[in-house]
Image: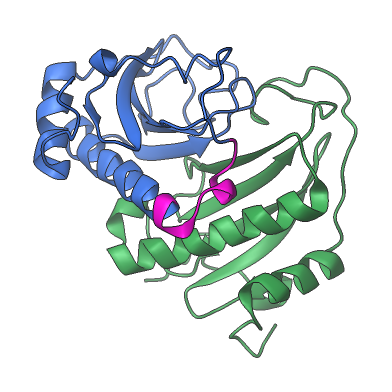
Chain colours: A blue, B green
Amino acid sequence: MIDARCPLCDLNDKDGLWANDELVVISAQIAGVGTICRVVWRAHVHEMSDLGLAERRAFMDTVFAVEATMKRHARPTKMNLASLGNFVPHLHWHIIPRYQEDAYFPDAIWAAARRPGAEHPLSDELLRAALCEALGQPRKSRL
Amino acid sequence: MIDARCPLCDLNDKDGLWANDELVVISAQIAGVGTICRVVWRAHVHEMSDLGLAERRAFMDTVFAVEATMKRHARPTKMNLASLGNFVPHLHWHIIPRYQEDAYFPDAIWAAARRPGAEHPLSDELLRAALCEALGQPRKSRL
């Protein structure tokens, strides 16, 4: 189930912080906010309800482990979780630490900015080590 | 765990489409989009990673059952799921059917509107019946 036109089907494991056979965790920088993580399902599936129960649970267990890890290290005001996929309909979750002084708070990060925003960066090295501690060693030797 | 200042601690079961001891499913109308559902955890908890594994799984199983139910009846372009809580830090999930002709597509519904938007309403009667079919009878006699 690979769609040649889909940028998330193209994801290179080398870009990941953690991975197993089903999913890859990546980081991204959002201007005015800082570091967020995304958990990307490897197969080109559109909706959570297209997955089976065991797949959904495995996916969400990882999403919540990333949430807990980011919360511990980023100490945000609030964690935000979202699976939208209107631009790229390939299942992926956004895990977003939010801060009162970020560009959008208390609105969603997809709203208009309220202020320039102080950015809270987290290094890939820190996240990679913290995710290994939370989730065990990645189960893909390529990472 | 009730916070007197929290509007979601105040939720009246009579407003719900479906409920059990842990959570309540409600509907809402979003201008330019139509009917969405929210799944609200009864206890005043801030983050998904503050719940135990069994609670998280029960919560998400309901969220995904609502997603599947809305997808079947609303036939949207894409389903969107989000747990933000920056305004009201009491766990609740938004389950949002999205349409190419809604006010915001393909942006998130928290972005600036791109067009007036065609609204897709779903009646509470239909949703209540469909959720009972998907989830069984509500386990609160007050509904």
Residue B101 vs A68, above or below: the answer is above
Q: Position of residue A68 (x, y in %)?
A: 24, 44
Q: Is residue A86 left or right of residue A90?
A: right
Dominant SS of magenta comes to helix
Residue located at (52% from left, 49% from top): A51
Q: Is residue B46 left or right of residue A126?
A: right
Q: Is residue B119 visible?
A: yes
State which region is magenta: A46-55
Viewer-closest of B101 and A47: A47
Q: Position of residue B52 (x, y in %)?
A: 28, 64
Q: Position of residue B135 (x, y in %)?
A: 62, 74
Residue located at (58% from left, 28% from top): A85
- Quadrant of the image occupied by residue B2: bottom left
A62 is within the stretch colored magenta:
no
Residue B2 vs A141, above or below: the answer is below
Q: Is residue B8 visible?
A: no
